[in-house]
Image (cartoon, coloured by chain):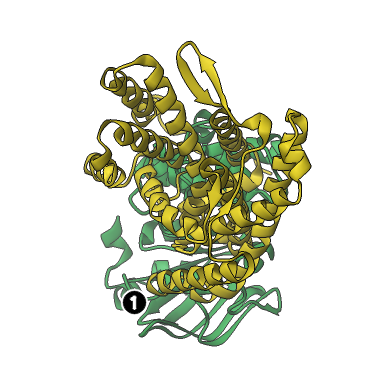
Amino acid sequence: MSEPLLDLTGVHTRIGAYHILHGVDLQVAKGELTVLLGRNGAGKTTTLRTIMGLWPTAEGTITFEGGTIASRPTPEISRRGIAYVPENMGIFSDLTVCENMVLAATGARRAEHLDPERLEWLFGLFPALRKFWQYPAGLLSGGQKQMLAVARAIVEPRKLLLVDEPSKGLAPAIILNMIEAFRQLKATETTILLVEQNFNFARQLGDQVAVMDGGRIVHAGAMAALAEDEALQKHLLGLSLAAHQ
Amino acid sequence: MTSPTATAPAQEALPRVRTDLVPLLLVPVLALAALPLTGSFSTWVTLTFAGLAMGMIIFIIASGLTLVFGLMDVLNFGHGLFITLGAFMATSVISRMGAWVESPSLGRNLVAVGLAMALAMVGVGAVGFVFERLIIRPVYGQPLKQIMITMGGMIVGIELVKVIWGAQSVPLPLPTALGGSLLFGDAAVEKYRLIATVVGLAVFGIMLWVLSRTKVGLLIRAGVQDREMVESLGYRIGLLFFGVFIAGSALAGLGGVMWGMYQQSVTPEMGGAINILLFIVIIIGGLGSVGGCFIGALLVGLVANYTGFLAPKVALFSNILLMVIVLLWRPQGLYPVVKR
């Protein structure tokens, strides 16, 4: 594993009376795709939200590129180069696809200010975006919204991309589209932390894997090792990869 | 960058973009429905212009309130204070410009009114700055406390208005050239009501332009839907809200001047009295929707004038009745804002 771009040490998160994260230790290596796996309620989404500053860090440290970002305001964390795609996609449904993209681009006031080369690349990844460019995003299908959410997050180069369950509720053809998009993104050496429950999806993309349970990381290592170890899969996830295929 | 090789999704048909025009039609339908009831065309024209002018002023005041709610879920029951303050600041300006106000020159009159409006907007915007910092900010996300503290803030503010300007009604006369009526056939339409309608349309047009053509407008529209995502994209929603709050306060100040001139006198209680009307308008329109607020304000203005003429007893509760009818039809208001 190369040097960590993002490093969480002993992170605790409390939301009101609930203690959700109980000392999360997680390293995300630069230029790699790390998958965060775990059952419902394990704390995966809370981990991403804590990194983004959407929930305050109660204890522990979060460092990004060597500087602390724990409990810093979300806009400041974003401006350091971290993009976030939430589980609900966070699409502004009353805005057009174009307006959604413009909002995500620093300094762009209109579509003409977007990097045309990068935009072409994104249209290549997600052709539906070109087609629905001037349409209200609320009219897109679930899969198209997910494409828009990912495209919006990478409309400009980012140092770290946090993505929460991108395959959730998507048709198999769209999932293939999404896998290809993440592969191309990996080729640009973008660091990605991906929360997933679909192990088959995760296996095809992940370099590293961390498994959460009860608000803690209970396993961390190479994805290839977990993908080959059925006993470990059963132990950590309750299901083997074979059951997902 | 690698060439695009991703699997293209199957060709999908382009969905039809449906513009919801039904609420827009309510205003002309209501006006046309009132035509046979009013008895004469000239009376109908007079009432319709009175209703439109009233609606435009209410829109100017309420537009900031609806955006403030839409962006941060802040229920500012102290908005009425800004109306009162704007109106009283205008009395101070107008009283010092007697020669300009009484001059038969339209230009000099407009300078006096324009100055009163500008100073009221700046003054009330400054008060809005302090109000947001001291009163609203400590209670973000606490709706019950917001209601209590903003109402408390308004009560204290109105007492301060009484200390400065006195508790009595203060006249706010229309400048000479802006008084009187224009005759369209037999129908008499007050000049001031025409001016109020034009100013209201101008404010609406500017707001639409800002919301649809500028990045700040995009951010406001996005923030009304999902403020957390706006922050995740690197924007400080608190700063945006702060700006919108100050602009909304300034517009309430402008509305206060216009309402005061509409009534030709101002009282410390005028803002509180209009407050209920404002909430009716923004609920009818859909909380957070500027377009809905505009339609809602026009409906409220027209209904108030038509019922005031046709059935004065019904006029006492006509706006509540209008709200009930609209909400039975569209429980989220005319143009509901899609929130995350």
Residue furthest to the top in view is B185
* The quadrant where residue B198 appears: top right
Q: Nearer the viewer, residue B179 or B338?
A: B179
Quadrant showing the C terminus of chain A: bottom left
Residue furthest to the left in view is B328
Q: Nearer the viewer, residue A12 or A109?
A: A109
Horizontal side of B28 relative to B70 (left or right) equals left
Q: Which chain is yellow?
A: B
Horizontal side of A235 relative to A123 (left or right) equals left
Q: Is residue B268 above or below residue B284?
A: below
Decide if residue A150 is in sight here.
no
> What x and y, as percent, mark residue B32?
33, 20
Say few, some or many: other residues with alpha carbon within 10 Å of mark 1 (under 14 / 14 to 19 / 20 or more): some
The chain ID associated with circle 1 is: A
Residue at point 48%, 70% (across, down):
B155
* The quadrant where residue B60 appears: top right
Q: Which chain is green?
A: A
Q: Amino acid at mark 1?
A: Leu
> What x and y, as percent, mark residue A19?
38, 85
Residue at point 37%, 21% (across, down):
B44
Quadrant showing the N terminus of chain A: bottom right
Residue at point 54%, 73% (across, down):
B135
Residue at point 27%, 69% (across, down):
A239
Q: Nearer the viewer, residue B33 or A116?
A: B33
Q: Nearer the viewer, residue A218 or A229?
A: A218
Query: What residue is pinned by disc 1?
Result: A236
Decide if residue B70 is in sight here.
yes
SS type, badge 1: helix
Horizontal side of A63 relative to A223 (left or right) equals right
Horizontal side of A29 relative to A50 (left or right) equals right
> What x and y, as percent, mark residue B108?
77, 34
